[in-house]
Amino acid sequence: TPTSGPSTGPSTGTDRPDVVVVGAGFAGLYALHLLRQRGLDVRVFEAGDDVGGTWYWNRYPGARCDIESIFYSYSFDEDLKKEWQWSERYAAQPEILAYLQHVADRFDLRRDITLSTRVESAHFDEETERWTVTTDQGETVSAQHLVLGVGLLSSTNLPQILGRDDFAGPTYHTGAWPHEPVDFTGQRVGVIGTGSSGIQLIPLVAEQADHLTVFQRTANFSLPARNGDPDPRFVRKFHEDFEGTREQLRSSSYGILLEPPTKSVLEVSDEEREATYRERWEEGTLTGILQAYNDTVRNHEANHHASEFVRKRIAEMVDDPQVADDLTPRGYAYGTKRPCLDTNYYATYNRDNVTLVNVRRDPIERITATGIIAGGTEHELDALVFATGYDAMTGPLLGIDIRGRDGARLADKWENGPVTYLGISTAGFPNMYMICGPGSPSALSNAVVSIEQHVEWVADLLTHLEEQGIAVVEAEPDAEVAWTEHVQVAGRATLYPETDSWYMGANIPGKPRVFLPYIGGVGYYREHCAKIAADGYPGFALR
Ligand code: N01
């Protein structure tokens, strides 16, 4: 039952907690709840002025989840799952934020969360075997354990475009949207970027603005979301068999309820393939077509069928053949850049007040005080939106000055790419746990299911340490090298590494090119982690 309202500071307020958790989004909130239940003294620091993480910051028009809300929500508490009713199949940002605020209140979490406070550094002190954590508010605390729930996509990317800071009008990044409503009425608005964020935002800005100019570098594959009421079959399923449904999610490949494909697309007839794709297209899910056959992201010929199907649909939806051609994704395999779900995205380009600039043909030369010059033409703008994404997965971790044994910096250790054991731990940084770190399925899954698995695994580990009187746990170098290689080998069995995407770090100039998430599947990964725990944590030094 709810026991506390909003508060801006901790009521326990200790400067020597057992655990410091960084971040109060889906990961940090659950970590606080569960670790507290295990009897640990926990402090959470959150940079935002409220809980919510991703769903606190991403307030741009059209922001909503693209995994059905009934699955994209916690499953650790049966009552919570059954009580909360989503108003839509894919809930919008205000509702997801309200849900996380509700969770914070319902489980009395706020008293241990310090808001409006960014963790600047975390240094491991070898003498005390504790982490010294400092914040931008001048607070220093000492904790035995450090849990990093900083998110995968929370470090915004503002590209270095010539003249970027010369623009005289307001500029926005989708991931740091203002809290007060932004009104584009009567304005000429520019949007750079056509990833998931741009694709959600563009239709709504087009409806409001006088004119919208979209600057597209890479055309994306997007499927219609067919948002509406929550699917009653799934709601019922959770009500009738909570545990069984939860188990199904946890043992699935992506953390959603979708039968795993058993057939190759190459073994079915043209008619069967077309009918299956059609059916999946009508369903409106992120992975429907991607997961229709088992080789879509493993084989170019198989992928070509899925890619062509979506390309044809784009051509049908866009009136102007040149614009349709520019919106048609080519040169990379469908699915290897994260696909999108949209509402009216392609039809938006049929509006008179929308211009598409293909910056591969007409490169952006510079931003000026009054607009953007691309391909020799100046596009005059009153406001500019950067939907240009994130320094994914490693950016949020390396944004904190993290130092382990011998003062070694995590940023130096990961100079050539992240090295982790299970995406949770990294050698030389004892008692530090990443929630959905690089090398975990996270980015290739329903993040909430992955977060719950990590938080529960870490909580079990801390309970084990407590019971055994062990003070320090640390990944062993051999184990992390083997795991990191396994993650890359699994990636190389797919088409992902061929594509320039944030999965590969390719969207950030100078970032090492490695496949950041683990593609072994949520269910397999969970079993693997569980076996490591059951076997007494091989690959970890415990003392
Ligand atoms: O970011 P992105 P996002 N000049 O990196 C372009 C999740 N998410 O915020 O593809 C011109 O995907 C860039 O072009 P290119 C989801 O996991 C989920 O949209 O690099 N363009 C691209 O078009 C998603 O994948 C939801 O050639 C430049 C765009 O900016 C992830 O977050 C909603 C440029 C960036 O796309 C990130 O999505 C939103 C430049 N210099 C986000 N630099 C849902 O749940 C970059 N671009 C629905």
Image (spheres, rainbow, N blue to C red):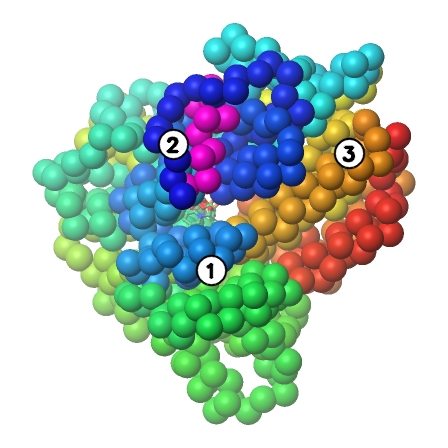
> Which SS class for mark 2?
loop
Residue 206 picture location, percent across and down: 20, 49
Camera-nearest residue between 476 and 211? 476
Q: Which image quarter is the C terminus in? A: top right
For label 1, the residue is 71
Location of the N terminus by quadrant is top left
- Amino acid identity at mark 1: Phe
Q: Which residue is mark 3?
A: 466
The residue type indicated by label 3 comes to Glu
Q: 198 or 262, which is in the foreground?
A: 262
Asked whether residue 384 appears in the rendered view, the answer is: yes
Mark 3 and mark 1 lie on one chain; the one further toward the N terminus is 1
Marked residue nearer the N-terminal end (2 or 1): 2
- The percent coordinates of residue 86 (x first, y second) are 33, 57
How far apart are the alpha carbons under marks 2 and 3?
29 Å
Q: Which residue is mark 2?
A: 4
- 488 inside magenta stretch: no
Which residue is farthest left? 186
Residue for point 17% across, 38% down: 184
Q: Secondary structure at mark 3?
A: helix
Q: Residue at x 51, y 38 (%)?
A: 29
Res 531 quadrant in image: bottom right
Amino acid at the residue labelled 2: Ser
Residue 111 magenta: yes
In this picture, residue 480 sits left or right of residue 80: right
Q: Which residues are magenta?
A: 106-117
| C-alpha separation, residue under disc 2 versus residue under disc 1 | 27 Å
Crowd around label 1: few <14 · some 14–19 · many ≥20 (10 Å)? many
Q: How far across and down, in percent of the image, does residue 403 sit? A: 72, 19
In this picture, is 306 found above or below 123?
A: below
